[in-house]
Image (spheres, grey):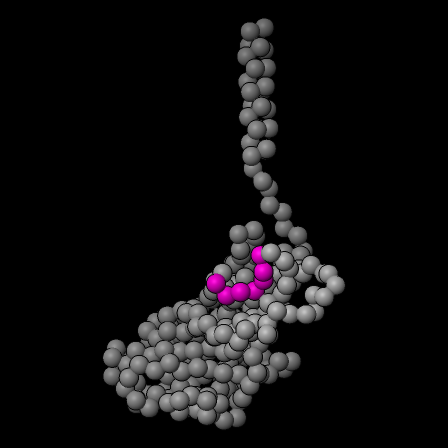
Amino acid sequence: MKKLMVIFLILCITNTISAQLARNIKLKFITPLDFKRWTVIDNFNFDKINKWDLTEKSSAKKSPLAVPVYFKKIEPGAKFIQLRGDERFFTKEYLNNPACLGVKILFPELKQTIVTLLPKESYKIDGKCKKLALWLLGRGRNFDFGIVIKDYLNRLYYLEVAKLDFMGWRYFEKKIPPYIPQSYDIYPQRMTIEIVGFYVVNHPSRYADILYRPFYLYIDQLEGLIDKFTTQYPGIEILDNW
């Protein structure tokens, strides 16, 4: 009888602890809407989206130092399995792109230079962007790579993404900092951002052969973690951006 009482008390205590833990733990479920949050901005296959000038020195005319920059469609693209996610879920994705964007830069002087990689038109983000992600193929040089963002007031932000001191394809994510305005706190209004392009900063003091060899970089699968939810009300089409 005593053994039965002990077993009964143990079961009661276990059930009480389990119920208390269940109240404190918030279970996170994965829904189809969560997986749709990552949006492909450009896969650089140049079939449906072609924002890059592949025929001439696209950035030479726009750079004050007239740094020759060549863009070319390169085959194949990134082919990897990636595990990624935000604070709510993780997903396994198989990336098998047939092409990527090749970049060749010819530095004319042995000094630090910021080279902007500008498409023919910017990428407009439809919604509030929380993160940007892309694949980079490095060549082992300790250069800086970043993304140029423009807000709704046409102000530019240079966000550093990675050091290019690695070999092979690597996946990078960059959070959009809160100081880049995308919404108001007091009333809902969408303030979309644009991806103007990318930039590369060289460090010639570390590489004496920078004037004799072109610098190569490869970019693939540009994506954004985008929240497209908006509150609708009469007059939402009038924007405070003037």
- x and y percentages locating residue 61 in the rendered image: 46, 92
Asked whether 151 or 208 is in front, the reply is: 151
Asked whether 70 or 8 is in front, the reply is: 70
Q: Is residue 94 left or right of residue 205?
A: right
Q: How many marks?
A: 0
- x and y percentages locating residue 34 in the rendered image: 63, 56
Name the main secondary structure of what is drawn in magenta. Answer: loop
Q: Residue at x 56, y 37 (%)?
A: 25
Examine the structure image and report whether residue 157 is included in the region drawn in magenta.
no
Q: Is residue 42 visible?
A: no
Q: Residue at x 59, y 74 (%)?
A: 242
Q: Is residue 21 above or below residue 89?
A: above
Residue 217 location, quadrant: bottom left
Q: Is residue 7 above or below residue 111?
A: above
Residue 231 location, quadrant: bottom right
As drawn, the residue found furthest toward the front would be: 242
- Residue range corresponding to the magenta coloring: 179-185
- x and y percentages locating residue 238 in the rendered image: 68, 70
Q: Is residue 131 visible?
A: yes
As drawn, the residue found furthest toward the right would be: 234
Q: Residue at x 44, y 70 (%)?
A: 159
Asked whether 7 or 212 is in front, the reply is: 212
As drawn, the residue found furthest toward the top would be: 1
Image quadrant holding the N terminus, namely top right
Q: Is residue 114 above or below residue 164?
A: below
Q: Residue at x 37, y 73 (%)?
A: 144
- x and y percentages locating residue 105 in the rendered image: 40, 86
Q: Is residue 164 left or right of residue 117?
A: left
